[in-house]
Amino acid sequence: MPTVWFMIVSVMIAAYVVLDGFDLGAGIIYLGAARTTDERLKVLHSIGPVWDGNEVWLLAAGGTLYFAYPQLYASAFSGFYLPLMIVLWLLMLRGIGIELRSHMGNPVWQGFFDVVFCLSSALLAIFFGAALGNVIEVTHFPDRPEVYELRHRVGVAMVIFLGSAYSKEYDVGNVVQERTMEFGVGIRIRDLGWAFGGPASGPSPGAYQILEGVRVALTGFQPNTGCTKMRPTRERFVQRAITKNSMHEGTWVYEMRFETRTAAVEEYQAPTFPLFVLGTANEGLAMYDAAEGPRVPAITVKVESLTFVTDTLSLQRGDIGIVVVKSRDLATTYIEQLDYVVDYSAGTVTRFSNGAIASQATVAVSYGYGN
């Protein structure tokens, strides 16, 4: 389901970028391309039927993020509160400029709202780009971290799978273990914000805010439906790069570790060999002795389902030993000499009419036999 929501949000954002990008472009070139009143009216009429509808895609994407990915929604609005508030005001100013321009025919009035519409459109494109540019870069862990070049203006988060730890087996018949998978996130951040000597009201975030954003984004993330949600286990400072004239000069390096648990189960393959093979009992040793009674069998039939067509049930072989008769669902164990009697030499089981075994009942019989 998370994949479906991701696809829906992606389609909504893509639709907004494509459709409202046309509106923003018309607003940006509004004052330069349209010099006369008639030309400006033509530009406004080209976007008039659709500009407000196109912005619905942005509202729909925001609402879907709130319901499908509340943690991402919360971290985005916390980290980009000021840019998003400015974006909302600029969206309102664009609508005000378009709607109020035609309320009066005064050239000053129309010229003022023409400037409002054009500037708000241009600033919207700038603030959208600034918001995306300030998002920390996420990439796979490089093959050679020592030669990795940091080119992003804020920093980079490099994700690596560190390995797994397996618990003891839970089952004797199959391999079933708990698997704990550990992931590492190496974060390299440039000197930014109040945390590194900048003013407290500086526009750039400090390392703590960026680390907190990464933690919020990954905590609770479920890599797969068979895994638990990820949780942080460690966070530490690694080093500060001070190599002069390099791409890493002045950067701070941190490490965060996360883990998730799943079940490691042996892949089942149906056996291609017979589940039961015929064995040979000790030569000359009968399964039943008149003096000793039933002997321990060389081969045991675990469970065989048979039906009392008559009062006597044949096991299709003689010289049997250690017979146990149970109900079909294995819930009731019948008692020999009370519910039934066994002829060990002939290999038959006879029920007593006054016993617990009903007429024509299907029972589960286990017994031993030898050749």
Image (cartoon, helix red, strand yellow):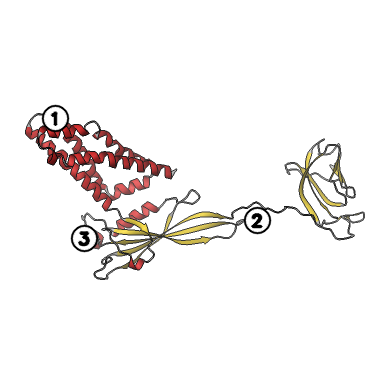
Of labels 3 and 2, earlier in sequence is 2
Residues at marks 3 and 1, CA–CA distance in whole angstroms: 47 Å
Q: Quadrant of residue 45?
A: top left
Q: Residues within 10 Å of mark 1 (few under 14, many from 20)?
A: few
Q: Amino acid at mark 3?
A: Gly
Location of the C terminus by quadrant is bottom right
Indicate the quadrant containing the N terminus: top left, top right, bottom left or bottom right: top left
Q: Sequence-wise, which precedes: disc 1 or disc 2?
A: 1
Give the SS element for disc 3.
Answer: loop
Q: Which residue is mark 1?
A: 102
Residues 166 and 200: in front is 166
The answer to which of 6 and 356 lies nearer the viewer is: 6
**Residue 266 location in percent, x, y?**
59, 55
Q: Which residue is mark 3?
A: 198
Q: Position of residue 269 (x, y in %)?
A: 63, 53
Residue 186, percent across and down?
36, 62
Per the rendering, the mark at residue 173 is: 2
Please state which of the two labelled residues, at mark 3 or mark 1, is closer to the viewer: 1
